[in-house]
Amino acid sequence: MMTEISLNVLDITENSVKAGASLIKISVEADTAKDSLVIRIEDNGCGMTPEQLSKVTDPFFTTRTTRKVGLGVPFFKQSAEMTGGSFDISSTPGVGTSICAAYVLSSIDRMPLGDMVSTMHQLIVMHHQCDFLYTYTYNLKSFTLDTREFRETLGDVPFDVPEVSLFIRDFLKENTDEVNSGQDLI
Amino acid sequence: MKSLAELKAIRDKMQGQVGLRAESEAGTRVIVGMATCGIASGARPVLNTLSDAVMTKNLKDISVVQTGCIGLCQYEPIVEVLEPGKEKVTYIKMNPEKALEVVEKHLIGGTPIYDYTLQKAMK
């Protein structure tokens, strides 16, 4: 198992990148009144065939050749279901893949959300070819980061120059703190 | 609060300088395993530490990239250093502190740290 939900998000989103997605939408929505934490990851990558999709939650299925197990999706699924939540994955070849993991927020078995700032920062800076639309919502207060806006503003200046990388990290941190009122979602 | 105006100011300052850090095939490549096994073992802070250090120390001709699973899951987090004309060095069971040491002693100092390598573990 991963130690925090944000690591599952990083791992699963790497699959979207490998699937050739040009736009990946990630949302984290926590609502204490509904006692829920919902994570959605949606990409426009190559998608999966119905046969691949039917096996994707099986830990002994993988498309890799370096090992015989594929634990990413099963880990994510189990982390949500063990809280009494749910997990859905749908995919269409040539269109993309959508994943929704819903957690019971107050469940003692829910792992911490963890460091979403590092996860998003790393995804954005390491994958120039992809755009990310990230929304973080906590009790109806939210912020959105859209790398397409950043790209438009920056012109040909890439995301991995120190000043831009630092800006992206600070943007994520400041806005997350603002939405959370400085309380990390543990 | 950070704004797009601030990003525009960065662009105005950086224009004309871009391309300086363009990845060079002739340069050193630092490769971090970022599959499920790597991430579960702590590769995220290792990759962050390496890319931050290479950026802040302005190390030219060194690129930090990521890869998938190379089949040595029990040794993750794994960092490979490929320098032109030299044998590949594979560091295993890395953490941010060890990664910083690799930056100082290997990438800057030119001497690999044998104690952290796969080669030592296989002996």
Image (spheres, coloured by chain):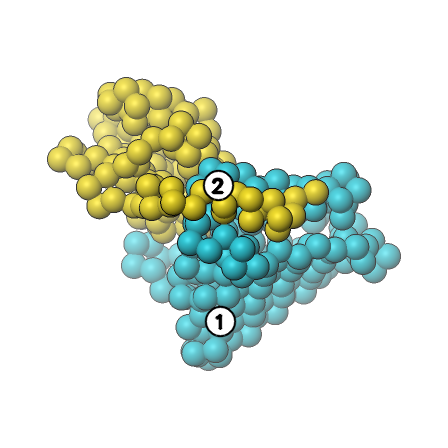
Chain colours: A cyan, B yellow
Q: Nearer the viewer, residue A166 or A56?
A: A166
Under mark 1, the amino acid is: Asn
Q: Nearer the viewer, residue A74 or B27?
A: B27
Residue denoted by label 1: A44
Q: Is residue A172 left or right of residue A13?
A: right
Question: Quadrant location of residue B16?
Answer: top left
The vertical placement of A15 against B51, above or below, is below
The residue lying at 42 percent from left, 73 percent from top is A46
Task: Locate residue A172, reporting x and y percent.
Answer: 63, 46
Disc 2 crowd, CA 10 A, few/some/many (<14, 14-19, 20+): few
Residue B75 is marked as: none
The vertical placement of A174 against A60, above or below, is above
Under mark 2, the amino acid is: Lys
The residue lying at 28 percent from left, 40 percent from top is B29
Mark in the foreground, 1 or 2: 2
The residue lying at 79 percent from left, 42 percent from top is A181
Local SS, label 1:
loop
Residue B32 visible in image = no
Separation of residues labelled 1 and 2 (CA atoms):
34 Å
Q: Are marks 1 and 2 in contact (CB under 8 Å)?
A: no
Residue denoted by label 2: B13
Local SS, label 2:
helix
The quarter of the picture where the N terminus of chain B appears is top right
Q: Is residue A98 left or right of residue A141?
A: left
